[in-house]
Image (cartoon, rainbow, N blue to C red):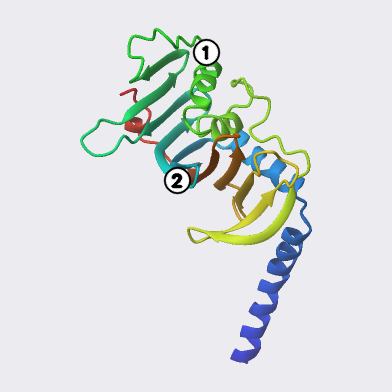
C-alpha cells in the first residue's frame, strides 16, 4: 500500500514536470528573449551585483579591466545604479552613480565631479552617458526594467538569435542564446526557471586590438529592497 502511494505521488509529479521539460525544449530563442523582457518589465523590485571583465588583446598582449556594478530598483520610480573601474593597488577606483527617487535625478562621476562633461537631464540621458564606459552594464538590465524611460529601443538587438546547448552558470541552469550573424558575437545565458539574465559574453575586433568581454550577474527580484541600496552616495 505504501509503495502504491509513493508511485502515485511520483506519477502526479511527472504530470507537472514532463510538460514543463517539453515546453522548455520547444521554446525558440526569440520566445526566450521575449519572456525575459516581460519578466524584467513587470517585476516589482530588482537588485543585482555583478562584474564586467574586459580583456583587451593587442599584439598578443592582454590587459584586463574589471568593472564591478550594482543595481537596485523599486517600481515605479526608485532606482540606483553604480559601476566602478578598478585602478589597481594604492589607487582609488573610478566611480559612476545614477540615482532616481521620484522625479529627483542625481548623478556622479569621479572623473567629472563638477559635471562639466556630463549633464544629464533625464534618466535616459544618464544611462546613455554611462553605457559605453560601463562596459554595457548601464544599458542591458536598466533598459529591460524601464523600457519607456531609457534611450535604447531594445536591450538586445539580435537579428537571428539561436539556441545553443544549455549550461549551468553559478549553480543556475540556463538557456544559452547566440547570434552567428551578430558582429559582436554576443552570447546570453538566461535562467530556465526565472528568465533572469545571468551572463553575457561578447567579442569584437577593432582592427588594432581585440576585445573579449564577460558580464556576470547575481540577480534577485520581487523582494524587499533596503533603502540603503537606493541612497545616493
Horizontal arrangement in the rendering, residue 13 relative to residue 73 (left or right) = right
Is the residue 117 above or below the residue 133 in the image?
above
Whether the residues at callouts 1 and 2 have beta carbons within 8 Å, the answer is: no
Instruction: Report which residue position mark 1 lands on.
Output: 122
Looking at the image, the residue that sits furthest to the front is: 59
Q: Earlier in the sequence, mark 1 or mark 2?
A: 2
Indicate the quadrant containing the C terminus: top left, top right, bottom left or bottom right. Answer: top left
Is the residue 172 above or below the residue 155 in the image?
below
Q: Is residue 192 visible?
A: no
In this view, the residue in front, 162 or 37, is 162
* Residue at 77% from the left image edge and 51% from the top image edge: 28
Residue 227 at x, y percent in the picture = 35, 30
> Residue 61: which disc?
2
Is the residue 34 above or below the residue 229 in the image?
below
Residue 82 at x, y percent in the picture = 40, 30
Among the 4 quarters of the image, the one containing residue 224 = top left
Horizontal arrangement in the rendering, residue 216 relative to residue 191 (left or right) = left
- Dot 2: element: strand
Q: Is residue 144 visible?
A: yes
Neighbor class of circle 2 (other Cα within 10 Å; few <14, some 14-19, many 20+) is few
Horizontal arrangement in the rendering, residue 131 relative to residue 26 (left or right) = left
Amino acid at each position: 500500500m505504501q509503495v502504491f502511494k509513493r508511485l502515485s505521488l511520483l506519477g502526479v509529479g511527472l504530470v507537472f514536470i514532463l510538460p514543463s521539460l517539453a515546453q522548455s525544449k520547444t521554446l525558440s530563442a526569440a520566445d526566450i528573449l521575449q519572456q525575459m523582457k516581460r519578466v524584467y518589465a513587470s517585476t516589482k523590485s530588482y537588485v543585482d551585483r555583478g562584474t564586467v571583465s574586459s580583456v583587451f588583446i593587442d599584439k598578443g598582449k592582454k590587459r584586463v579591466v574589471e568593472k564591478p556594478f550594482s543595481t537596485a530598483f523599486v517600481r515605479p520610480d526608485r532606482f540606483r545604479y553604480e559601476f566602478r573601474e578598478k585602478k589597481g593597488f594604492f589607487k582609488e577606483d573610478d566611480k559612476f552613480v545614477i540615482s532616481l527617487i521620484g522625479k529627483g535625478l542625481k548623478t556622479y562621476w569621479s572623473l567629472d565631479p563638477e559635471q562639466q562633461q556630463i549633464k544629464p537631464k533625464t534618466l535616459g540621458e544618464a544611462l546613455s552617458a554611462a553605457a559605453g564606459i560601463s562596459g554595457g552594464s548601464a544599458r542591458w538590465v536598466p533598459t529591460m526594467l524601464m523600457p519607456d524611460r531609457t534611450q535604447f529601443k531594445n536591450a538586445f538587438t539580435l537579428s537571428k538569435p539561436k539556441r545553443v546547448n544549455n549550461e549551468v552558470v553559478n549553480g543556475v541552469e540556463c538557456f544559452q542564446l547566440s547570434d552567428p550573424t551578430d558582429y559582436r558575437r554576443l552570447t546570453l545565458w538566461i535562467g530556465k526557471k526565472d528568465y533572469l539574465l545571468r551572463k553575457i559574453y561578447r567579442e569584437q575586433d577593432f582592427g588594432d586590438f581585440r576585445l573579449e568581454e564577460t558580464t556576470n550577474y547575481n540577480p534577485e527580484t520581487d523582494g524587499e529592497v533596503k533603502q540603503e541600496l537606493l541612497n545616493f552616495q
